[in-house]
């Protein structure tokens, strides 16, 4: 399969290659130059937990009861 570098230096990747490799819009790729070849690799990133995911993980855990008393008595 071949593709052509455009005037801006962009290289469109064929849809078939993207589908087979599991690359989606917004994914980051590492670009390497080795022995005259250009190599693209999917960047592997640790999944980032957002607040919603954290809260979903807490579902079902008991919620501690809180009263209006201070957590600890601190002498002034």
Image (cartoon, rainbow, N blue to C red):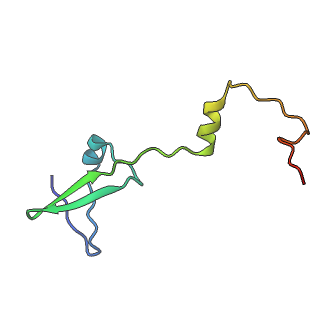
Residue 25 spot, x, y in % from top left? 40, 52
Say which quadrant the C terminus sits in: bottom right
Quadrant in which residue 28 is drawn? bottom left
Q: Residue furthest bottom?
A: 7
Residue at image x 61%, y 38%?
54
Q: On the rendered structure, is 8 left or right of 47?
A: left
Pick the front one: 63 or 21: 63
Q: Nearer the viewer, residue 72 or 31?
A: 72
Nearer-the-camera pick, 60 or 19: 60
Q: Is residue 51 above or below residue 32?
A: above
Going by the picture, which residue comes out furthest to the left?
35
**Residue 63 in the image: x percent, y percent?**
76, 29
- Residue 33 percent across, percent down from the top left: 16, 63
Residue reaching furthest to the front: 75
The residue that appears at 39% across and 48% down in the rendered structure is 45
Asked whether, in this view, residue 16 is left or right of residue 37, the answer is: right
**x 26%, y 45%: residue:** 16
- The residue under the point 21% across, 61% down is 32
Number of marks in the rendered image: 0
The location of residue 10, given as percent across then percent down, is 28, 67
Q: Is residue 61 above or below residue 22?
A: above
């Amino acid at each position: 399969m071949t593709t052509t570098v455009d005037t801006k230096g962009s290289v469109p990747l064929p849809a078939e290659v993207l589908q087979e490799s599991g690359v989606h819009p917004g994914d980051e790729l590492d670009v390497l130059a080795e022995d005259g070849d250009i190599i693209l690799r999917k960047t592997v990133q640790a999944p980032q937990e957002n607040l919603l995911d954290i809260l979903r993980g807490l579902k079902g855990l008991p919620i501690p009861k809180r009263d209006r008393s201070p957590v600890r008595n601190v002498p002034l």
